[in-house]
Image (spheres, rainbow, N blue to C red):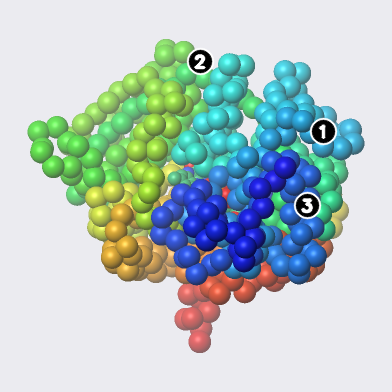
Amino acid sequence: MAVILLRDSADPSTFQEAVWGRVFNHRRDVSRVPFAFCAARSVSDVVAAVSLAKSRGCRVSVRSGGHSWAGWSVRSDAVLIDLGDLDLTSEIIPVPETKDGGRGGGRGRTVYDEATKIVSCPPSCTGRILNAYLKERGRMFAGGHCPDVGLGGFLLQGGMGWNCKNWGWACESVSSVDVVTADAKVVHCSAVENADLFWAARGSGPGFPGVVVRFHLMTRPLLQMYQSLYFYPITEFKKVLAWEISVAPTADKDTEIVGVSAYTPVPGKDEKELTIMASFLTFKSTREEAELPLKGIHDDPQRPKGAVLEIFAQETSLDNEYYLQASSNPEQHRYCAENAYIVDDGSVDVPAVLEESFSTLPTKKSFALWFSMSPTSKRPIPSPGPTGHYGGGSMALSMQSDHYFALYTVWDKPEDDKRCMSWTHERMKTVERHAVGSYLGDADFQYRRTRFWSTEAGEELMKIRRKWDPEGRICGYLDDGDKSGVDGLANKFEWLALDNK
Ligand SMILES: Cc1cc2nc3c(=O)[nH]c(=O)nc-3n(C[C@H](O)[C@H](O)[C@H](O)COP(=O)(O)OP(=O)(O)OC[C@H]3O[C@@H](n4cnc5c(N)ncnc54)[C@H](O)[C@@H]3O)c2cc1C
């Protein structure tokens, strides 16, 4: 039975805690007050909450893991459906058999089907929980790097998971979803059933016109993990990034390549220093297999000299990586994240464009990221066309380039909000001129409007949203003033419009 709290009758502090308690970012706009909070325990609770919103003429907002940087789940006058306690144990969602065979075990909270290798789980399941479950079965899912990000928000926007550069977007491993629609019906969506909604579930992000209550995901074999790390003084940034960019496209297919600037402990120094770290994380069956590509990188004559710390082929694990990611993204802190896909046609000097952002972090807890996306970014994503609509790997996700750049500004005092936010937005103003667009996952449309899809996919997505949710029942994209509604996002460079004025 769902816990439902109404704004007008609940104890104010209980209501406040229910609304904001599971939001990761402590920089919160508490002027957004929902009409009601519903902790759904079953799919029927979700149906009831959507029906309640419908009868009251208000909107529905959704929360899975609460890790949206901008607190997208908290919306003025909406019914907030929190899926944190969604337990599918006693439910059988009435799903007809499909020809694609894509449906995993039909019941249970998280169920792995040995025959299809598909795991079915609720959207509030996190990468850490899912992988702990799969580990016992010798499988893994390449979910988000941070342990506690909910699969719901992560997969809907695409999902930059482990080794995304080679294994592709996490949403490409979604075989089907179960959805409560904006008019409170339960539907199953796959490549052959409600295919337009399934297409939208792979890249619409927070504008998905329904509530996903279960994901059916293709898993992969669990592999061992080995990592080489090279830390350089930040003054070497351009050389280090240029080197990473040069090795990335042809590097081993099981190796994730990342560049991060952050304040780190350095041998021989008392204080943490700003460094640029080049990371190579390899997933293989044995140490010998992993050492081969890592040795090639280690011995590469082009590798810059002058590292202050070098670690070669150190064994690691998902648990260990989750621990490190959680330490870099501490709880009870204030965050501002922004991002851009930098042009990759050779016309842009990527290290030069990014240097200032990586070298001038405004706090010691902040970090800047370059995430290699090549060769995944080189695969054309089929557009939805009049014939063969939505098939052949087509998905709403359609924005990509070789270079993913993101800023994660982290601080703990409200008095630093203005300085930290301004720094982040000012940096983006320069970088975005060299970008093809951005990723929904690290974006905040209240502050920056840009391109999130190809033109064709963006138009198709807005059409599908209008078809499945003509009244704008599901909150959708939180822009400045929360006005976007059924129109969705313009999918245009804001700076271009300003320049042309
Ligand atoms: C510390 C940290 C680390 C991160 N690391 C990564 C990473 O490695 N890779 C990556 O790609 N992203 C990463 N992200 C971004 C993250 O994936 C997004 O913020 C994502 O939206 C979080 O999902 P959530 O379910 O936890 O968030 P929520 O705040 O619960 O959901 C965000 C929004 O998504 C929509 N939504 C969520 N669930 C549903 C549902 N079941 N049905 C319909 N709509 C739904 C709603 O609009 C909701 O308001 C990270 C974020 C944080 C805070």
Q: Is residue 77 left or right of residue 285?
A: right
Q: CA distance from mark 1 to mark 2?
A: 37 Å
Residue at 43% over, 23% down? 317
> Which residue lies most toward the bottom here?
501
Residue at 86% over, 37% down? 95
Q: Considering only order in the chain, which callout, 2 or 3, is on the residue closer to the N terminus?
A: 3
**CB atoms at circles 1 and 3 under 8 Å apart?**
no
Query: Residue 272: image x %, image y %?
Result: 18, 42
Q: What is the quadrant of residue 289 in the picture? A: top left
Q: Which residue is the site of mark 2?
A: 285
Front residue of 269/93: it is: 93
Pointer 2 local density, CA inside 10 Å: few below 14, some 14–19, many at least 20: few
Q: Name the residue type under label 2.
A: Ser
Q: Considering only order in the chain, which callout, 3 or 1, is on the residue closer to the N terminus?
A: 3
Q: Is residue 178 left or right of residue 121?
A: right
Label 1 sits on a secondary structure element that is loop
Query: Residue 381: image x %, image y %?
Result: 67, 48
Q: Name the residue type under label 1.
A: Ile
Q: Is mark 1 within 8 Å of ligand 1?
A: no
Residue 472 can be seen, yes or no? no
Q: What is the quadrant of residue 415 in the picture? A: bottom left
Residue 167 vertical placement versus 201 (above, below): above
Mark sitting on residue 48: 3
Q: Nearer the viewer, mark 1 or mark 2?
A: 1
Query: Residue 80: image x %, image y %?
Result: 64, 57
Q: Name the residue type under label 3.
A: Ala
Mark sitting on residue 92: 1
